[in-house]
Amino acid sequence: MELSAKGLIFDYGGTIDTNGIHWGEVIWQAYTVAGVPVSREEFRDAYVHVERTLGSKPIIMPCHTFHDVLDIKISMQFEKMGLQDMAQAKKIAGYCYENTSQTILRASKTLDTLAARYPMVLVSNFYGNIRTVLNEFDLIKYFNEIIESAEVGIRKPDPEIYKLGIDKLGLIPKDVIIIGDSYKNDIAPANILGCPSIWLKGKGWDDKDDTIEHPHIIKDFSELKDIFL
């Protein structure tokens, strides 16, 4: 895999925090482990409804930690599906939080190595509290700039949000590598802008991306050290 860069741009959710696994899959796995009596279809509908609600209403505040976010999300999912056991919802949130904490701990070792060699920017569709979350997991130190959709008013897959990251690096697109888990939200915008990209391709929300080919696919976040070192 031949790639060269003067700067790196990272996606956050689904990339750094889950190692390429879609968040819907992460939470569904927790539902399965907990034995929640709902079908995958019922969960999927509730998941999509809650994400749209959180994206359109100021429910999550800048001060909310990621543990708060999970508590809010899963309690809203339970309410949407008519589930009453909020103690079980809190257990699921705790399970997801512990899983995420361990995944981020592993990812931070790679970020630590890369940040010593490259300027790095984070570009994320998030709820307005990304800096709180990054501080919570001691990740903010790795990034020269943070571009958050709720703050700049642009959401992926609009390539303009990534262009803001490129401008912050002060580089031209061909010298900036974009790294993300979503073809639609990360790789396709990189293609439009003329940036090389690395696709962390894990378990997606569905199989629609399975047939898409890309020259630079990794299956684990730690593979980035092999590419850049």
Image (spheres, rainbow, N blue to C red):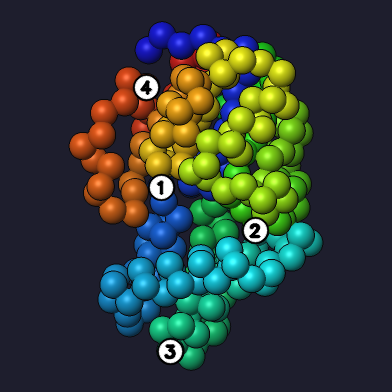
**Image: 68 above or below 112:** below
Quadrant showing the N terminus: top left
Residue corresponding to mark 4: 216
| Mark 4 vs 1: CB contact within 8 A | no
Residue corresponding to mark 3: 82
Residue 13 versus residue 220: which sits nearer the camera?
13
**Image: 147 above or below 136:** above
Q: How many marks?
A: 4
Residue corresponding to mark 2: 127
Query: Of callouts 3 and 1, which one flags the residue occurring earlier in the amino acid sequence?
Result: 1
Q: Residue at x 64, y 25 (%)?
A: 166
Real-space CA distance between mark 2 and mark 3, rounded to the nearest whole angstrom: 25 Å
Q: Which mark is residue 49?
A: none
Q: Residue at x 48, y 90 (%)?
A: 84
Q: Residues within 10 Å of mark 1 (few under 14, many from 20)?
A: many
Residue that sits furthest to the left in the current view? 211
Q: Residue at x 63, y 65 (%)?
A: 69
Amino acid under disc 2: Tyr
Real-space CA distance between mark 3 and mark 4, rounded to the nearest whole angstrom: 43 Å
Residue corresponding to mark 1: 21
Amino acid under disc 1: Ile
Query: Of callouts 2 and 3, which one flags the residue occurring earlier in the amino acid sequence?
Result: 3
Q: Position of residue 108 (x, y in %)?
A: 62, 34
| Mark 2 vs 1: CB contact within 8 A | no
Amino acid under disc 4: His
Q: State which mark lies toward you, 2 or 1.
A: 2
Q: State which mark lies toward you, 2 or 3.
A: 2
Residue 165, visible in the rendered structure: yes
Real-space CA distance between mark 2 and mark 1, rounded to the nearest whole angstrom: 19 Å
**Image: 25 above or below 168:** below
